[in-house]
Amino acid sequence: MSAALPNGFRFSAATSAFQVEGARTADGRGRSIWDDFLERPGAIKDGSTADPACDSYRHPEADVSLAAGLGLDRYRFSIQWARVQPEGRGPANGTALDHYSRVVDALLDAGVTPLPTLYHWELPSAVEEDGGWLERDTASRFAEYADLVAERLGDRVRHWYTLNEPAMTTLQGYATGALAPGRQLLFGALPTVHHQLLAHARAAEVLRAHGSSHVGLVNNHTWVLPLHDTPEDHAAAHAYDIIHNRVFSEPLLGGGYPDLAALGLPDMPMLPGDLELIGGSVDFYGINFYNPTTVTVAAPGEPIPFDIVPTPGVPVTGFGPEWPIMPEALRDLLVDLRRRHPQLPPVIIGENGASFPEPDRAGRVEDADRIDYLAGHLSAVAEAIAQGVPVEEYTVWSLLDNWEWADGYTQRFGLVHVDFETGERTPKASYDWYRDVIARHRAEISR
């Protein structure tokens, strides 16, 4: 590592509920948009259903033990809205809250700080039927859900993510339809940006009212590269940067939305006071980073002004050219964010990881490619810190192999191999590597 990580730097790993829990009909759980989406013919690459996945709802102790074995400072997991409020409104399902309460207690007993995410894409189907994130009312319903969870867990949980990757909900869920809820609205999806950020801000108020001291959200960010050094490709890269990155970050960090009219896009559906509520609503800013994105100008007449193309000259993950590997892109993104926002709040890398082809059956996996990927990106974080970026935490995605959304079980991200037929969990070489990185860091700072 070319630069050292500072004293007090934290290490985490993450999962999300729908990807690991299984038990989709247990204990009164309602339906979510992902239950609806996976039933569409051809929507999921391998036709799988996220059940039993890792069976973590029935066996959370197995995951807690693995988190503790790494020596994690914090474990990021998510709570399913459709478990807590099966119809997205009304009283809480006490059985669901009992489950998540046991998870919190088990983590605390193991010496790992719980860091729940209130929303990791699993919108209750009933809320989507009422318009989903296209409707302003969804922000109010989300705040009510946050209040129910905080009422039960807030005496022990002080650190929260509200939303995971609102960019992907907007761009892939409502604009292109690649993910749930599968709408194809293109730029008609833009209201979902504002309503998600408003939901975050309202939930943050609720969580703080219950005594929480550390509330943020986590955005997916990418470092955007023009394919050619031409004015046209630079303009295309700028447009993509606004749509993927800045429209989600600027209201939180800069006080307002970027100039959408310059791209021929409509204004956000704001009411007076919205930006004041959203701005400054984060105690920390979470960044999920996986890869850079290379774009070129679109052909004349296309509805979108850019085309995403392979990034030349770099290796790729198991997703192929869709996910190029360029650790320095994370450093450059972080440094640029600090340059544009000198008062940047503390930053957490909320997800970083890679999928590579691995066997399905249980057994030891020597995943050198994953170790190289993680080591490169952790070094990039250290270099960004050395340049003044206030990164306080790094989170590996994922603790476990899991159900990878529209790709089903065809992609494996875990530090731990999961045999999805038997449920057997086997730590990979990357698990041992990450455990040793954490132990060495603590030994160095204790000298």
Image (cartoon, grey):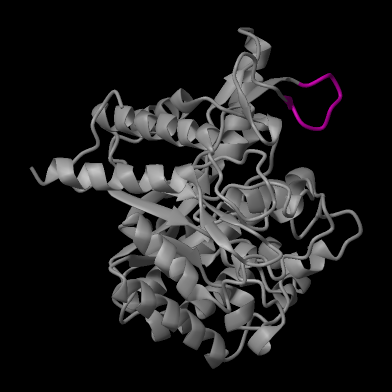
How far from the left and from the top, in percent, is residue 334? Answer: 39, 32
- Give the camera-side residue of 83 and 87: 83
Name the residue located 40 percent from the left edge and 47 percent from the top edge: 432
Residue 72 is left or right of residue 252, and the answer is left
- Give the camera-side residue of 148 and 264: 148
Count of marks placed on residues: 0
How far from the left and from the top, in percent, is residue 103? Answer: 44, 77
Q: Residue furthest right?
A: 41
Name the residue located 40 percent from the left edge and 85 percent from the top edge: 151
For the C terminus, the image quarter is: top left
Q: Is residue 308 at all visible to an observer of this figure?
A: yes
Q: Is residue 401 magenta?
A: no
Q: Residue furthest top?
A: 229
Position of residue 152 relative to residue 300, above or below, is below
Q: Residue furthest front?
A: 363
For the N terminus, the image quarter is: top left
Q: Quadrant of residue 292?
A: top right
- Give the camera-side residue of 235 and 90: 90
Residue 203 is left or right of residue 369, and the answer is left
Q: Quadrant of residue 24?
A: bottom right
Position of residue 77 relative to residue 316, above or below, is below
How far from the left and from the top, in percent, is residue 185? Answer: 80, 49
Residue 434 is left or right of residue 329, and the answer is left
Q: Which residues are magenta?
A: 298-308
Name the residue located 48 percent from the left edge and 70 percent from the top edge: 62
Q: Main secondary structure of the magenta part?
A: loop
Q: Is residue 301 magenta?
A: yes
- Give the camera-side residue of 343 and 420: 420
Name the residue located 59 percent from the left edge and 54 percent from the top edge: 401
Q: Quadrant of residue 27?
A: bottom right
